[in-house]
Image (cartoon, rainbow, N blue to C red):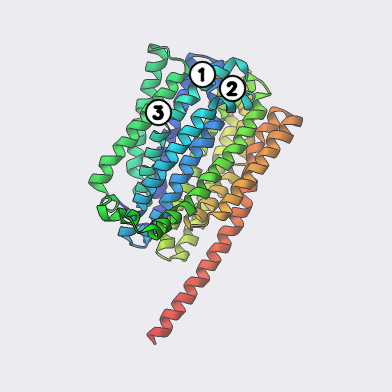
Amino acid sequence: MTKNLTVGNPILLIIGFATPLFIGNMFQQFYNMADTFIVGRTIGVTALAAVGCTGSISFFILGFVWGFNQGTSIVTAQRFGAGDEAGVRRSFAASILLSAAMTVVLTAVSMSTARNFLILMRTPVEILDAAYSYIIVIYTGIAATVLFNLLSNMMRAVGDSRTPLLFLIIACIINIILDFVFILVFHTGVEGAAYATVIAQVVSGLLCIPMITAKIPVLRIRKEDWYFLRRGAANSAGKELWEHLRVALPVGFQFSIIAVGTVILQFALNGLGTLAVAAFAAAVKIDQMAIMPMSSFGSAMTTFVAQNYGARKPDRIRKGLFQSLGISAAFSVIIGIVFILTGDRFAAIFIEKGSAAIPLAHTYLKINGVCYVLLSSMFICRQSLQGLGNSFVPTISGIMELLMRMFGAIILTRYFGYVGACWAGPLAWLGALVPSFVMVFVKLKWLNRGAIAGRRKQNFFRR
């Protein structure tokens, strides 16, 4: 069930690894979009706006979960690439411990502050109660989100991107069925859609456990893999946990920093009225589907780079980086053209025919479509840096993304209204791309010099 990405044609390996990630991410979005689609079609635009306006504060918490679990798996992937199987198991054990602690803290904080956050964001009064009902259920299921993300990222770290795909497909089917059951049969309102999402996540997470136990021996944790926590081994435990926190915390905070920008943007949108909120919510769902291939290439690069970094193969990293940049950029141009020409038809999937929200959603898709090449390059460069274990520059990239999104939300929205809000995303991508693009090539240059020096040293002693 594992896959060694340190040998073979880089681009073929990356595509092969990214394809299940892409399909899995598509299904992840499908069951997120199911809430939006079913709520918008069965309850109405007001309910759609209620679900949509929770996206930013949901991402603030869940984004940290995604980033944190991705960060701990980077250490696992580097050890797997280096052939250190005992280190892989210790990494898994440390990740479980850290994820459990994170779950307790995030659940307590998010549930106690949810309503205040919605009020602070100027959520329209007519949708406040419905938005709170939805988000509080999502926060109750943080443990389920952590469980699946932890286990699926561990599988990907050792090269298995197919099994998480299977479980996401199952979760998607469960979510869609339960959406209809809760909303149409039990008449639970918007919170029914949240129940469906949480239950689907619980199932997908639980399915990972027997699969890892039965099919992935390198992740079967033994008693001795917990010895770094034994009494009298404080230094060992601290070193092991810190190695993971050093990477995981910056990646998690990077997601949360980005989420702060979306919260500020949502704050500005809420001031434009329910129609603008609904149009933006629908357009964002379509946008999230469109960027999945770009995001999947970025995620694949994290594992590819981490394994090859552990194996000390900078030439393979460079080759895979250039090839991925080219393919991802080509796709971004194609999808941008599609949205410019037919974005209104996609918007009509989520919004009732004839609604004034459709042209507003199309405006968002056109502006983002023109700039997708920036986003695709940003994904590749930033996540390659994460695979190299560099957490500082991706954090700076996240801060730049935040500042540019704030500029769009506060300044451009004030002077240009909804159109200004639509430009916040592309500006954020540009701000995030610049430091990532520069640093990834600087880092590769340093690695290449080190590899050349190492080979010269080996040749010297062979003489």
* Residue at screen point 36% across, 39% down: 165
Q: Earlier in the sequence, mark 3 or mark 1?
A: 1
* Residue at screen point 49% across, 43% down: 295
CA distance for labels 3 and 1: 19 Å
**Residue that badge 1 annotates:** 40
Q: Is residue 203 visible?
A: yes
Residue type at numbered disc 1: Gly
At numbered mark 2, what does the secondary structure look like: helix, strand or loop?
Answer: helix
Q: Earlier in the sequence, mark 1 or mark 2?
A: 1
Residue type at numbered disc 3: Val
Where is residue 326? Give x, y as percent: 53, 52
**Residue that badge 3 annotates:** 198
**Residue that badge 2 annotates:** 278
Badge 3: few (under 14), some or many (20 or more) residues near its Cα, within 10 Å?
many
- Tell me if label 1 and label 2 are in contact, CB under 8 Å: yes
Q: Nearer the viewer, mark 3 or mark 1?
A: 3
Where is residue 431? Give x, y as percent: 65, 47
